[in-house]
Image (cartoon, helix red, strand yellow):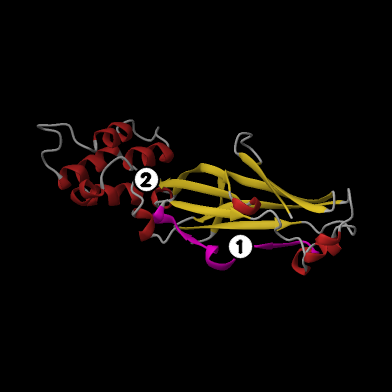
Amino acid sequence: MFQFTEFEKVLRTDNPHYERIRHSELHDVVNLVSRGNTFRVEQLVSVMNKVSPERWKKYSKTRSYLIRECPMLLELLAPKIIGFHTLNMRKGAGGYIIHDLIWTSSTGVLEDLRHKNVRVREKVYWQAPDNSVQPYVVEDYRRQGEHYGVGNAVETQGWVGQNTDSHDAAGPFSPDVLKLRDSDEVEFVVNQTYQQTNGASQNWIDIPLCSYRILRRAKCIGGKIQFTIKKENTILPNDRLSNMVEI
């Protein structure tokens, strides 16, 4: 159990002259824990992450004491992705939606994500379409299912801090969609959630505020097939875009 008197002894072991002359990087850490057991471990993580890795090398015994005596601290200190959000969502040629995403590390240093092999992927899942729609989608989408990225986009290394996700308007539609007659229309919806490994156990967890609904529509207009795609964040109303192509 954490005891400030014991903590202070360890701190003085690391640096007998702590703040005798100047303000230390650990000032906010010490100030927080000096309240005894009234602080929350989440608060401690926040102030500890503001201390540079180089400084923690000097105060390694202090850090070890905190990790040992504060339950859950080690797990919460593991670097993880934060601030994952849309940088830009733009229209591409041929009806594509091009989705640029960026993020940072909870430690403030992207490279820290490499040490825990933190990675990013998508989870895409869908319900079985109505019987009337099934002939117009490829086999894999005629029943309920899911996948976790395709081709080279299965995973992204977390420490690169960015990714580009592209969606074409035709998506899961089969060539039979070209047989639609004038005014015929079919729709297919998939759900997409971006995920990250949690750093400690390497389990995949959903990234907050990063779930999307992707609707694709094929409609015959004047003998041509119009493909429309719409991607929208299920929580953030301004994080959305649609595009269209006609063939």
Does residue 147 show up magenta in the picture? yes
Find residue 1 and name its label: 2
Please state which of residues 79 and 183 is positioned toward the viewer in this rendering: 183
Q: Can you tell which of label 2 and label 1 is closer to the viewer?
A: 1
Question: In the image, what residue occupies the spot 25% across and 47% down?
Answer: 62
Going from N to C along the chain, the mark reached first, 2 or 1, is 2
> Label 1 neighbourhood size at 10 Å, few (<14), some (14-19), many (20+)?
some
Could you tell whether 178 is left or right of 166 in the image? right
Could you tell whether 141 is left or right of 11 in the image? right
For label 2, the SS is loop
192 shown above or below 154: above
Instruction: For the N terminus, give its image quadrant.
Output: top left
| Residue 17 point in image, percent of width and height | 10, 38
| Residue 18 point in image, percent of width and height | 15, 37
| Residue 29 point in image, percent of width and height | 29, 37
Disc 2 marks which amino acid?
Met
Can the viewer see residue 127 in this picture? yes
Find residue 148 and name its label: 1
Disc 1 marks which amino acid?
Tyr
Q: Which residues are magenta?
A: 142-160
Question: In the image, what residue occupies the spot 85% across and 64% down?
Answer: 135
| Residue 74 point in image, percent of width and height | 39, 52
Please state which of residues 125 and 95 is positioned toward the viewer in this rendering: 95
Question: In the image, what residue occupies the spot 81% across and 59% down?
Answer: 128
Could you tell whether 209 is left or right of 216 in the image? left
Could you tell whether 117 is left or right of 144 in the image? left
Give the CA separation, mark 2 to mark 1: 42 Å
Can the viewer see residue 71 in this picture? no
